[in-house]
Amino acid sequence: MKTYKGYTASVRFENGDNLLHGTVEGIRDVIHFAGTSVDELETAFHDSVNDYLGWCTEDGVSPEKPYSGKLAFRTTPEHHRLITEAANAEARSINQWMDDVLESAARATLATGSRKVRAG
């Protein structure tokens, strides 16, 4: 996978049209590009990202940033101790434990279909 301006591409080949197709991963907005060769595909990838960023600027919208996989987290010392003990009880690192717990909580929350608006 290639990266350009922080955006990462995934690529697939469509046999029916003999084109390489790519999309930008890690964002909800859809950025698609295609080419008949690797060089053409890479140029189309760069052009599509630049077009996306230009469109966002013109419309006064913040472009989506790809998720890095790094999440800053602050908590109380007591919660930190509890998290550490829970991770140790399962013989896992804090990162592994938190990743699973947070993913499970996020999926459960999203499964309800309920959406609240945070006041701002």
Image (cartoon, rainbow, N blue to C red):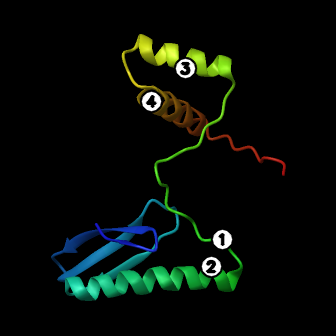
Query: Disc 1 versus disc 3: distance between alpha carbons?
Result: 35 Å
Q: Residue furthest top?
A: 89
Q: Give the camera-side residue of 77 and 17.
A: 77
Image quadrant where residue 48 sits: bottom left
The residue identified by callout 3 is 83
**Which label was assigned to residue 62?**
1
Q: Which callout, 2 or 1, points at the residue further toward the start of the chain?
A: 2
The residue identified by callout 2 is 56
Q: Nearer the viewer, mark 3 or mark 4?
A: 3
Query: Disc 4 versus disc 1: distance between alpha carbons?
Result: 30 Å
Q: Amino acid at mark 3?
A: Ile
> How packed is label 2: few (under 14 Cα within 10 Å), some, or many (20 or more)?
some
Query: Disc 2 versus disc 3: distance between alpha carbons?
Result: 40 Å
Q: Give the camera-side residue of 81 and 17.
A: 81
The answer to the question of whether label 3 and label 4 lie on touching residues, with beta carbons closer than 8 A, is: no
> How packed is label 1: few (under 14 Cα within 10 Å), some, or many (20 or more)?
few
Q: Which callout, 3 or 4, points at the residue further toward the start of the chain?
A: 3
Image quadrant where residue 64 sits: bottom right
Q: Please tell me which residue is depicted at 46% across the width and 26% down the height of the picture.
A: 94
Q: Which callout, 1 or 3, points at the residue further toward the start of the chain?
A: 1
The residue identified by callout 4 is 100
Q: Which callout, 4 or 1, points at the residue further toward the start of the chain?
A: 1
Q: Secondary structure under badge 2?
A: helix
Q: Is residue 102 above or below residue 66?
A: above
The answer to the question of whether label 2 and label 1 lie on touching residues, with beta carbons closer than 8 A, is: yes
Query: Disc 4 versus disc 2: distance between alpha carbons?
Result: 34 Å
